[in-house]
Amino acid sequence: MSARRESGVAASPDAPAVPLGGSGRRRAAIGAAWIAFGAALIVFPVVFSNPTVTTIGVFTLVYMTSATAWNGFAGFSGYVPLGHAVFFGVGGYTLALVALHLNMAGGYAMFALVPLGGIAAAVIAVPFGLIALRTRRHTFVVITIAVFFIVQLLAFNLGFTQGSSGVQIPTPLWTAATFNDRFYYAALIVLALAVLVVWGIRRSRFGLQLLAIRDDEDRARGLGVKVQRVKLVGFVLSGVTVGMAGGIYAFFVGQIYPQFAFDPLFDVTVALMAFFGGLGTISGPLLGALLLEPIQQYLTLQYSVGSLYLIIYGALFLVVILAMPRGVIPTAGEYLQMRRARRVERADGRSPAATPSVEVAPLGRASR
Amino acid sequence: MHGGISRRKLTAAGLGSLITAGALAGGLVASSAGAADHAAPKAATPITIGVSLSLSGDFSADGQAFQRGYQLWAKDVNRAGGLLGRPVKLDIVSDASSPTQVVTNYQKLISVNHVNLLFGPFSTLLTVPASKIAYRFGYALVEGAGGAPAVFANGLHNVFDVSLPVVDNLVQFAKWIASMPASQRPKTAAYPTSNDPFTEPQIAPAQRILQKAGVKTVYSKVFPAEVTDYTPIADAVAASHAQVVVLGSVDVPTVSSFIQAFAQQHYNPKAFIATGGPDQGAAFVKAVGASNTNGVMVPNGWYPGYANASSRKMVSEYVKQYGGTASGINSDVAEAYSVGQVVAQAVTATKSLDNAKLIAYMHGNHTFSSVQGPVKFDKLGENGAAAAFAFQWQKGKFVQVLPAHDSNSVKIQYPKANWGS
Amino acid sequence: MGSSIVQAIIDGVLTGGVYALMAAGLTLIFGVMDIINVAQGIFVILGAYLSYSLSVHAGIDPFLGLLITIPALFVVGIGVEWGFMRRLKEGDRTAMSILVTYAVSIVIEGVLNISFTVNYVQIHAWYVNRSVHLLGFYLPYIYVFGFVLAAVLLIALYALLYRTRFGASVRASLQDRTAARLVGIDVRRVSTISFGIGVAVTAAGGMVFGATNAFNASTSYDLISRLLAIVILGGLGSMGGALVAAVFMLVLEDVVAVAWSPIWATAVFFAALVVVLSIRPAGLFGRQVARAQ
């Protein structure tokens, strides 16, 4: 077993328990950056108003939400679930079926069904989590895959889901030019919610407990952490916003079918985005989704003729993973720290080793 | 690792990526702005037709056949002088069989490429979201491969399916069996079908007709579309000793697995019809093996030997361009070609590219002609005049066998030859 | 109904052998390297395409062709390990391996689509459609041969693991990589060769799969989820476990398909996995792990 854990993935650069190693000014700068980011997202559809761009924007926001929420569990607990499509699909089906049974017409009222999708996802997450979380890492991955397939099959075969004919979702009659904007903003709200949840987790003792579980589960249990409950709560929390994202997605596309609502590619894509950006960081999955989703859509659009896009996408991905195995954000951060340390060293002849590095780590960071 | 540094960097990176994404998007806008309608004398500017096709992924075999059909049509039209005096240009993008991509694709074709007209994608699953976007922007969506009821359940008046409505596919076959004299008529039937909006709606009407004619159902089960191993299911069908097998399949692998298992079990039903697969020409023969195709039937609205002038012309051109034989032509090609023909006729008749006018015209009870026969749209957009045929592979040739009294039908091979003969 | 069920059991046993072959490689890689090789599915298809090409273009019988395709895939495996897997750091190895192997698999899928087009093909030979009549049941030759091949290769693998020095190194690395390194085993080399072997056996599995199913590059997705389930059910690194799990799962699925309904057969497959794992988290023959992995 490795004696030392990579700093990038373990205690994330933004470890909660301790005041950050920077000055108040730095914290203000970071806060300002986040605000600027949020503002950019808000004005995006106004600036880039072409419906094609906002369409990609909606899908990207949906993935950003899903990747963030997924990372909120996987990144902190170290358990890698590959079955979150269950929540995505449940959210979508909830919206679709309720709209169907209430004979709703397409309109703003349907957005009220989105939180309902989140609740349904949370409800499903409980038995799902209870079954899956009893196992350890490798087995957990496969159990989540298995449950995913079971749910997909249920969607195909239970009468009320209408099986392979899928469910049609009423589409509102808003003006074409700004049709997408409503979905964009709805997705943005859900994204904000997801980010807040993850941020809240990390800043709390609950988050500490998750991190402890990641670093050494048995030791955490020995230290009094209620491991099963903590894992379950984290798992359920990660499902809620994914369910809501699924509801918005289904409403946007206008239909829902079992194999697309419960799509194994969704699971891999979300994991990909989180890893790409940096597991365990907040901004990592955001960046991952922000880059990967438009790129993937663009490549498919331009190069799918002839399957070339598969090769390009895969190769691109391989290059990035191997060059930055911990994800873009942590690697970028490390690179900058290296530069900074060298600059400091050159400035006053000190060796980089003397530079103050690790802040007081949360429970269990150094072990493993 | 310091929290502060990386955090600032990462938010800058975040902003940077947002801008990158925006630039990418902007690039999309810019790169495609070269389409049709800028400057230039009217005569020279081509008419652009946007299509999203599944050139990879689950539907790729059909998507690529569709592409060939659309392209063949475009070539023919341009050779004959174009539409309204202008050349036709296809703008084809791929959706990798994904509904998410279909949404983006049609959105881009409409709002970025500003195409004049749209053709439909492959499969009901992708046609529905495409139709909603087209509707929103007032485009007509003429398609040839989205025929399940789900497509027409939304009450959108801009969708037109030129092919035979799915539900009626097996009726000819069922009626033929029912019309046999009682002594000849098979006594039992099996109905294995894939879990799919294309196959399931077809089975029930056929089963009703057969049951009324006294053919007992000895096996009727739905199997998942994602099965990798059909052997136990096929073996169960074989064990039922049904004299007729009505297989609800969408693609070649399904049919070929069943045929293989039937051959291994030495089970030879008197009649065997599959809803999809045997109509894919060379692809079917290659997968199943030439000696196993004998006697296999499939319903469809078209086949390469169809006695229709424009169909024959299309067939010979296809062979000239892509090689192979007439029997090897996938029926998707004809569906795609028909879409082009109907749209061309509507455009020529209304002398305009105004989608609203085209929609009104196509709902105006006019009959169009296509390589698949006559096309006349009902209120929903389905083709009420579509010809329903059943075909059979006979000694390596794909021939029309039903309707029995049609002048172009040959005698049906009944009972079906044993596998491998 | 009774004979249908017996037929289903026979089908399950025979096809289980084929799946066991494909899963054996996966479990070996998984066990020795903690790597989830999601590309195993596409390697199977690659093997199938290679066998297909040899059969169609060079007229080589698929079983004989294995003499070429197995070494070929061994080389491919080594190449992938050397090029990509060894760059993975210890910490997040398993999770990262999913991503890396997924990326590799889509690149290979793209290449296959371009080389062979997306049309479905199937490997043909005299034994594919014929069957032997035994005790009132028809046993398709290809399944019987495939089962025998699977058994032979699994026995060979077993011999390799338990009767050779190299095999001892593999087993040591399987148990504890650090300890193995301490004892002087070149874990890196062992890993590379194990990966190569794990991929090489997919050539055999692929050949039989390609002869019994029409396939193209996208068939790999269905395959990999089942293979993963089988491997975990059987227990990490256990060859015997892979065989038992494969046969168990396939028989269960086939019987359910016949006795109840094909729709629920696959659901039962995965539900069985969930049930077994809840009781025995390490799988049927896996070692109970003392600490979290």
Image (tube, coloured by chain):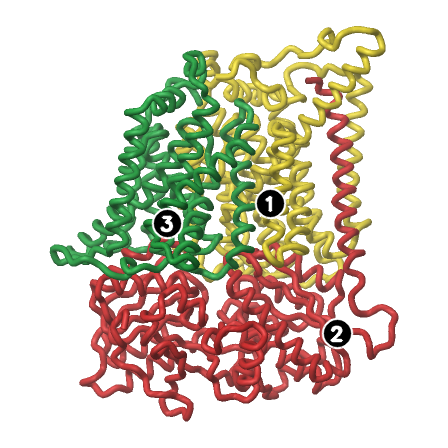
Chain colours: A yellow, B red, C green
Task: Write down the chain letter for disc 2.
Answer: B
Q: Is residue B404 above or below residue C244?
A: below
At x 69%, y 69%, the residue is B90
Residue B301: give x, y in percent of width and height. 47, 79
Residue A245: give its label: 1
At x 20%, y 76%, the residue is B187
> Horizontally, is C56 left or right of B71 in the view?
left
Type of amino acid under label 1: Ala
Separation of marks 1 and 2 at Cα, in angstroms: 39 Å
Type of amino acid under label 2: Ile
Q: Secondary structure at mark 1?
A: helix
Q: Which residue is mark 2?
A: B47
Is circle 3 on the same chain as circle 1? no
Q: Secondary structure at mark 3?
A: helix
Type of amino acid under label 3: Gly
Q: Judge whether residue B376 can be spotted in this image.
A: no
At x 78%, y 52%, the residue is B27
Query: In this orientation, which residue lies closer to the viewer: B44 or A297?
Result: B44
Q: Is residue B47 above or below residue A275?
A: below
How crowded pointer 3 is (Cα within 10 Å; few <14, some 14-19, many 20+) is rated as: many
